[in-house]
Amino acid sequence: MCSIPVSAHTTIARLEALVCDLDGTLYLGETPVPGAHEFLERILASGRKLFYFTNNTSRSRDTYFKKLAGLGFPHSPEMLITATDCTLHYLQQHRLGPEIYLIGNRDLQADFTAAGFRCLSPQQCRKVRPKAVVLGFDTELDYEKIRNGYALIQEDIPYIATHADILCPVAGGQFIPDVGSFIALFARATGGKEPVIMGKPTPHAVAAISARAGVPPRQIAFVGDRLYTDIRMAAQHGLYGILVLSGETNRAMLAVSPDQPRLVVSSVADLTNALIPLQ
C-alpha cells in the first residue's frame, strides 16, 4: 500500500468517471489483483461511472463479459470498451468492407462477423480482394496467415492494427508477444510498412471513452499499468493518468520513461479510500 498526496485526493474527488485497463491492472491471467473488487464497488458507490478499456483483442466481447462475471466484477455492455470497437468504427466510417482479411483468432473473428464483416480465409483472398487487412492479437497465428498478410500488405491494401501493445501480461509476472510484436514482424518483412493503429493511446480510443462516459477527458481518470499506451494516452489527451505497478511497469522503467503519470500507486487497492462520494 502507498499513501496518496493530498493534491491527488482533491483531483480524484472532482472526477466523474474512471476507466480501467484489464490485464495487469485489475487481474493477471485468471487471478484478480488484491483489492480490485472493493475498488470497483467503491467507484459505483461513490456515484461515478465505471468503464473498462482493453487493447487485448484475443477475446470477444462475450468472452470478456463472461470473464468479468466469473471474477465477480461489476459488468454491463456499456461498461466495456475495446480496441475492437475502435477498429470496427474506423472500418465502417471509411467504408472498408464488408470483405476483410483478419489476422485474428476465432474469438476476434466472432466480433467482426457479428458486426457484418466477412472475414476471408487465405484461400478466399485469391478470388476476392479484401478491402482491408486487419491485424489483431492472434493467439492462433500460423505461417499461412503470416504469408497471406504479407502479400496483401505488399499490395498496399489498407492496413489496420487493433492496437500496438508489444507484450501482454499473464499470471506469474510473465508476458507473451502481443500485436506490437506482430507489427514489427510485418514491418521488417515489407520494408517498413506500418498499419493505422486503433486502441490506446490513439485519439480513436479517447473519442470512444469520452463518448461513452458523456463527459470531456479532463473529468475522466484512466487507470492502467502500461506507460506507452495507458499513460501516454492520458498525458497526450487530457485524462488523469494513474499508473499501477501491478502489471508491466516497474519503478526502474518509470524513471526513464518520457510517459509520466499524474499519480503512481502499487495497485488499484491504494485508490479505494480516495473515492469519496461525488458531490
Image: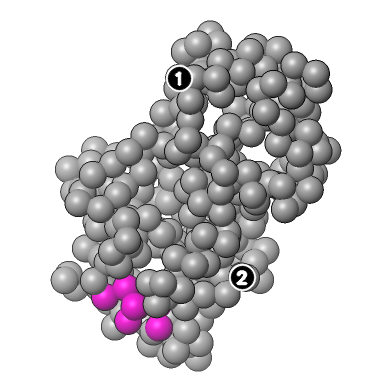
Mark 2 neighbour density, 10 Å: few (under 14) some (14–19) many (20 or more): few
Q: Could you say where residue 203 lies in the image, as x and y percent from the top left?
A: 61, 47
Q: Which mark is residue 77?
A: 2
Spot occupied by residue 78 in the image (x, y as percentages of width and height) = 62, 70
In this picture, which residue range is highlighted in magenta? 35-41
At label 2, the amino acid type is Pro
188 relative to 99, above or below: above
Amino acid on which the number 1 mark rests in the picture = Leu
The answer to whether 224 appears left or right of 191 in the picture is left
Q: Nearer the viewer, residue 68 or 211?
A: 68
Query: Which residue corresponds to mark 1?
Result: 185
234 or 181: nearer the viewer: 181
Residue drawn at x 51%, y 75% as measured from the top left:
75
Residue 38 within the segment the image draws in magenta: yes
Q: Mark 2 falls on what kind of element? A: helix
In terms of image quadrants, where is residue 130? top right
